[in-house]
Amino acid sequence: MPILLDLFLSFAKIGLFTFGGGYAMLSLIENTCVEKKKWITQEEMMNITVIAESTPGPVAINCATYVGYKQKKMLGALVSMLGMILPSFVIIYLISMFLDRFLEITWVANAFQGIKIAVGILIVDAAIKLLKVIEKKPLQIILLVVSAVAMILISIFSLGISPMILMLSAAAVGILFALFAGKLRKEGNK
Amino acid sequence: MIYLDLLLGFLEVGLFSFGGGYAAIPLIRDVVLSRGWLDDEAITYMIAVSESTPGPIMVNMATYVGSVKGGALGAVIATTAVVLPAFAIIILIMVLLKKFMQNKFVKAAMDGLKPCIIGIILSTGLFMIANNVGILPSFSVNLLTLCLTAGLAVVYFGSRIFMKKGLSPIALILISAVVGIVAYGVKQ
């Protein structure tokens, strides 16, 4: 199959089955782009996740653009992004036009309750897969545990604190740690 | 003019929403309310629909608001506007990527960011599971959901450990939808 068509269809498939937003989709992207198609490595998947989380916009669009650009530059990026958008665009457009009380249909609501269970499992699965590719030194373990606990507290008490604040702090800790360890000076200034 | 309004409103959403769909919901709510596109009840329903249909939540919301306010053209404009900043920024990073990723400060920051983001993702998943089951935040356990969650988790992770390929995420989603229709349908 031509690579552009392959990109389009693969991302359309991911877009069609991604419920519950970006995090759940990381599992689907990993399964397709790393395991099946081998378009990117597990380490690149980790980097994409960090970049997608640190840049604005839907995580799915960030990921599709990255993988598409890596395969076929601009055209690949465009085709992958369109593939990602098309299923949701068509579905939402039809719902907004024709289905006024979509969520009140009993079997739709039941199916979604079931899907929500899968979404939770897939998000945990995505985290476990990413965990395999990072170093596990004390700095990493502490940052991971602190971030996870902080996020859970933020969610339980609906504190309205953006995860961005956690991420900025973690980036600062990373830089300070490197400065402290003398890594930045030894390897030349930039 | 509504088209220009949709373009600017959703460019703003696309440009300032960090951390994916759920984090963007308050921002979208704010943009939609402040421009008087929908009332509070309509937005709440729209958010529920966007969460329950496939695809990125932000894209779903943009398509929904766009089509309600400006028909097919409105939907296209709003959707394009919401993805444009993310697309442009990633292209920019990709073009500069080699230099960007080799910068010592970027490397050091990434060392801190990676475990933090894994922690955020892990806790989001665990919180969602706890929320489905009912343990958090209200301590009222839904026994049926607890059993279904445990069952699906065992089947999914078990298949990945003991079989060469295991269940794909898409297979898990399809199975869980059918399980949901049957189990919650029977209960009612």
Image (cartoon, coloured by chain):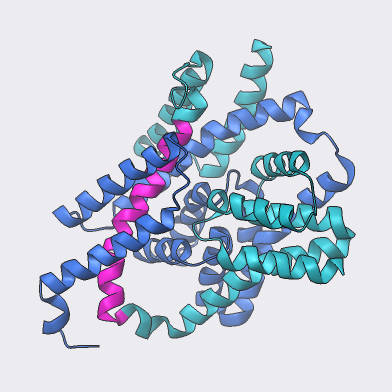
- Number of numbered labels in the structure image: 0
Quarter of the figure that contains the N terminus of chain A: bottom right
Compared across the picture, whether B112 is left or right of A10 comes to left
Q: Nearer the viewer, residue A33 or A69?
A: A69
Q: Nearer the viewer, residue A185 or B151?
A: A185
Residue situated furthest top in the rendering: B187
The location of residue B156, given as percent across then percent down, is 45, 34
Compared across the picture, whether A163 is left or right of A2 comes to left
Q: Quadrant of residue A46?
A: bottom left
Q: Nearer the viewer, residue A7 or A96?
A: A96
Residue situated furthest front in the rendering: B34
Q: Is residue A29 above or below residue B179?
A: below
Instruction: Specify the segment rendered in magenta.
Output: B102-129
Look at chain A in the picture and name its colour.
Answer: blue
Tell whether position B124 is magenta. Answer: yes
Q: Is residue A184 above or below residue B11?
A: below
Tell whether position B181 is magenta. Answer: no
Q: Quadrant of residue A34?
A: bottom left
The location of residue B184, given as percent across then percent down, is 64, 18
Look at chain B in the picture and name its colour.
Answer: cyan
- Residue B140 visible in the current orientation: yes
Q: Residue at x 29, y 69 (%)?
A: B109
Quarter of the figure that contains the C terminus of chain A: bottom left
Magenta region, mostly helix, strand or loop? helix
Q: Residue at x 29, y 52 (%)?
A: A132
The location of residue B167, given as percent across then percent down, is 48, 39
Q: Is residue A24 above or below residue A62?
A: above
The location of residue A45, given as percent across then percent down, is 41, 62
Compared across the picture, whether A79 is left or right of A167 comes to right
